[in-house]
Image (cartoon, rainbow, N blue to C red):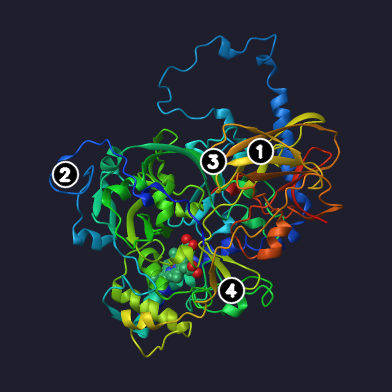
Amino acid sequence: MGKQNMDKSKTNSRVIMAQAERESAQLEPTRRAFLRGSAAGIGAVAAMGATGGAAMAAGNPENLPPNVPEWSKMLGDSVTAEPYGIPSQYEKNVHRRTVPWLTPTGESSISFTPIQDLHGIITPNGLHFERHHGGFPHIPKEDFRLIVHGMVKNERMFTLQDLMRFPQVSRIHFVECPANSGAEWRGAQMDKLQFTHGMVSCCEWTGVKVSTLMEELGVKPGAKWVLAEGADAAGMSRSIPIEKLGDDCILAYAQNGEMLRPEQGYPLRLIVPGFEGNMNVKWIRRLEFGDQPWHHREETSKYTDTMYNGKSRRFTWSMDTKSVITSPCPEYPMLGKGYHQIRGLAWTGAGKIKGVDISVDGGKNWMPARLEGPVFNKALTRFVFDWEWNGQEVLLQSRAYDETGYVQPTIDQLREIRGTWSIYHNNSIHTWLVQKSGEVLNVQVSGK
Amino acid sequence: MYKFPVSKFALGLALGGFLITSQAFAGDEMKYGFGVKPSDEEIAGWDIDIRPDGKGLPEGSGTYDEGEALFAEHCAACHGDFADGGGGRYPPLVGGTPGELSQAVRPGQPHKTIGSYWPYASTVFDYIKRAMPFGNAQSLTNDEVYAITGWLLAENDLHDSDEPMNAEALKKVVMPNVDGFFDDPRPDVKNPHCMKDCFKTVEIKSKATLGVTPTGEDALR
């Protein structure tokens, strides 16, 4: 190593390492938490929930009957006061959040959808969870190209305009990061719904079916795999079996009716319905047809699942059937005894959700919930359950099953087969402990 | 392996009813003819992927000493002078063995590095070329990527530090964990659809009272 280089890199290292140290001080959640004392965390959550509820109930008396509020007397804003409409200023707390200690940088990191605040199957565009590996680029649409090459009869390069001329399809599908609930493999860790389950979103995706391009370009015999590659600074690349691509995958340029958001892959991304989020390559620039998988970093070092014995599953693409109760939840505790409509979301990479059951005793007994349609293929599906809460402590769970008959498993069942090093694909039944105070706590239970 | 439904394209079903485009008149097989044929040069500029069989490996070569100097200049700031993560938060790139990936052997954390976990050496070249150094991706020449790849593999005792690294040398490297992977066996869990008296007792095993969840501003970067 040249001396000059060494000096340079030392200075560099010092700056960056100082930063790394600052960040690593936040690591080791378990130890830190024990040092801090465990009660503090819950107290804060409870306080938040309680103040929120109280404030909403109180309001400003001058605006309440019999008084007539300001807004009933004065003109409101004119049209185009907000040329691109934004949410009410009173919903400012509804936004994506991240967990800074999870990753060393914000460019290769995750943000979570606030599913505790959402009320339909569609995730608004500004709230779709993010997972970038090299930050999200801003690509001018005129500088976008998609190259399709390799084992195809006609290699082709497309502009966005070219792709928009092909027959168009629109499908509603969820996208879930396989690391969703990944922090919970060893035990209940995150104390809010946004962080236990917020790496799932669901949008209407519009674009051209990959099968349309395959028919157009002609796939050569022997082609079995396609490398999908992004134009971002991570050059995200995944090997995808050609059967899946030709079945239901979409090269999407629009999301919920408007062009993709930059953080969702503008101007073009791949949608691989029901498969792990990472395969839905954003800012896609290349599809290469070949006869073998590439075994790239994101399908070997990452997105593989190490079992108890140290052997690892690879190509674990499909997202298994999963559900979670979104009301009540830690962010929105119970407001009192009596009627409460339990609400939640279920989804499956296997196709359609067939049903969801609710347990109020930690899984001893189950009662069917009602699916609150629409029920789409590989899409978030809402369920509701009319419940009378008697004010006692309750272990609340939801359990989804799909049209193949597969039933969402318990965390014990998953751990027994996989150990706790999987990181990915934790689709276990989730438990909320509803306390007498109405506060809701993330817990894990074991039934015998 | 994952089973797929027989898809329309596999059956070769044509959709029919399309207008014949001018391209089609030109003797092209394409129905729509949108887009252009990319030149070899255009494809080559973006076609950077490498496969385990060596397909895609470019010409070029680099030595251990070059690799060491390049790593110090471009990589060590994050990954540590010895590529061991430097005690920081960036991934370690050396150390560990496949044996230590077993939870019985090492109950704490699996020690996953290029040496202990990655099944193919081609992926090292591919990933460094496409994504590193973080923040200045696709800036290294092929010679430089070979040199750093060779150095990293040598530090993992997987390459002779006296030998230069190049396409031929890279193809010969057999990674220790090459047999450590198997295809997805799911569905692996069968939860019976029990509705009544499924358990006699239910015990709370853990509670999320660690206080590690961000609460306010700390939930933003």
Residue reaching furthest to the left: B26
In the shown orientation, is residue B200 left or right of residue B184? right
Query: Label 3, label 4: how many angstroms apart (C-alpha)?
Result: 36 Å
Is B43 placed left or right of A248 in the picture?
left
Q: Nearer the viewer, mark 2 or mark 4?
A: 2
- Earlier in the chain: of badge 2 and badge 4, it is 2
Could you say which quadrant of the image residue B125 lies in? bottom left
The answer to whether tags 2 and 1 share a subunit is: no
Query: Can you see residue A14?
Result: no
Residue B52 visible, this angle: yes
> Which residue is under mark 3?
A379
Amino acid type at circle 2 is Gln
- Identify residue for label 1: A344
Residues beneath discs 3 and 2 located on the same chain: no
SS at mark 3? loop
- Mark 1 belongs to which subunit? A
Viewer-proximal residue among B80 and A2: B80
- Residue in view at x 65 percent, y 45 percent: A401
Q: Nearer the viewer, residue B69 or B9?
A: B9
Callout 2 and callout 4 share a chain: yes
The residue tagged 2 is B23
Residues marked 1 and 3, same chain: yes
Q: Dot 4 corresponds to which residue?
A: B111
Q: Which percent across, then down, holds residue A257?
A: 42, 33
Front of the two marks 1 and 4: 1
Q: Cα distance, mark 2 to mark 1?
A: 51 Å
For the residue marked with disc 1, what is the amino acid?
Gly
Relative side of A247 to B145, left or right: right
Question: In which chain is the residue bearing label 2?
Answer: B
Name the amino acid type tagged 3.
Ala
Residue B1, position in %: x, y? 51, 62
Chain letter of the residue carrying label 4: B
